[in-house]
């Protein structure tokens, strides 16, 4: 009986740590997905042939990711899992969450506005600026 109680106590204490690790892993996976989705549009902006299907797919990844991301930064997940999330996220959480909302809204607007290569070249940089603007403030560069 004592062993069972001890096991339950240990499990309850390790649960929050595992949950924190899980959100860090989830947000890292989502960010990797965003990075992967950016490859083709980035190449197109540098002169590779335009492919609207790839652009629309990337924008769908952005919108989906933006909807999920702010919920993956709960209090207590500031450290661990080799995170590059800056402590500034939790100091300015409303701004951080608003940036994800803007990223998602911009991705949806671009998906509606992009119909050809010219509109892609006009709209896609606006969406991608969200990434850099957020990373400048809320990401710690790996050394």
Image (cartoon, helix red, strand yellow):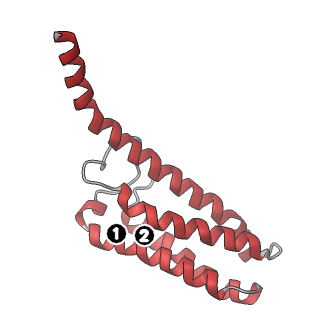
Q: Which residue is mark 2?
A: 134
**Res. 143 visible in picture:** no
| Quadrant in the rendering for residue 92 | bottom left
**Residue at horizontal 37%, vertical 63%?**
70
Left or right of residue 141, residue 45 in this image: right
Image quarter of the N terminus? top left
Q: Residue at x 22, y 14 (%)?
A: 4
Where does residue 122 sit, x and y in percent of width and height?
Answer: 65, 88
Q: x and y percent of residue 14 in the render? A: 27, 30
Label 2 near label 1: C-beta < 8 Å? yes
Identify the residue shown where x is 28% and y is 57%.
Answer: 87
Which type of secondary structure does the marked residue at label 2 adopt?
helix
The vertical placement of 71 against 47, above or below, is: above
Query: Along the horizontal axis of the image, is 25 left or right of 128?
Result: left
First in sequence: mark 1 or mark 2? 1
Q: Nearer the viewer, residue 100 or 9?
A: 9
Q: Which quarter of the figure has residue 107?
A: bottom right
> Where in the figure is residue 50, as x and y percent of width and height?
80, 77
């Amino acid at each position: 009986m004592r062993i069972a109680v001890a096991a339950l106590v240990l499990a309850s204490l390790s649960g929050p740590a595992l949950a924190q690790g899980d959100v860090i892993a989830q947000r890292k996976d989502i960010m990797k997905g965003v990075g992967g989705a950016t490859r083709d549009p980035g190449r197109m902006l540098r002169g590779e042939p335009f492919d609207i299907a790839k652009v629309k797919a990337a924008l769908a990844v952005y919108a989906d990711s933006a909807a999920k991301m702010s919920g993956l930064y709960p209090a207590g997940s500031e450290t661990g899992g080799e995170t590059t999330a800056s402590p500034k996220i939790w100091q300015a959480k409303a701004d951080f969450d608003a940036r994800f909302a803007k990223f998602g809204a911009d991705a949806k607007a671009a998906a509606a506005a992009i119909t050809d290569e010219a509109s892609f070249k006009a709209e896609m940089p606006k969406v991608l600026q969200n990434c850099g603007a957020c990373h400048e403030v809320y990401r710690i560069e790996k050394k």
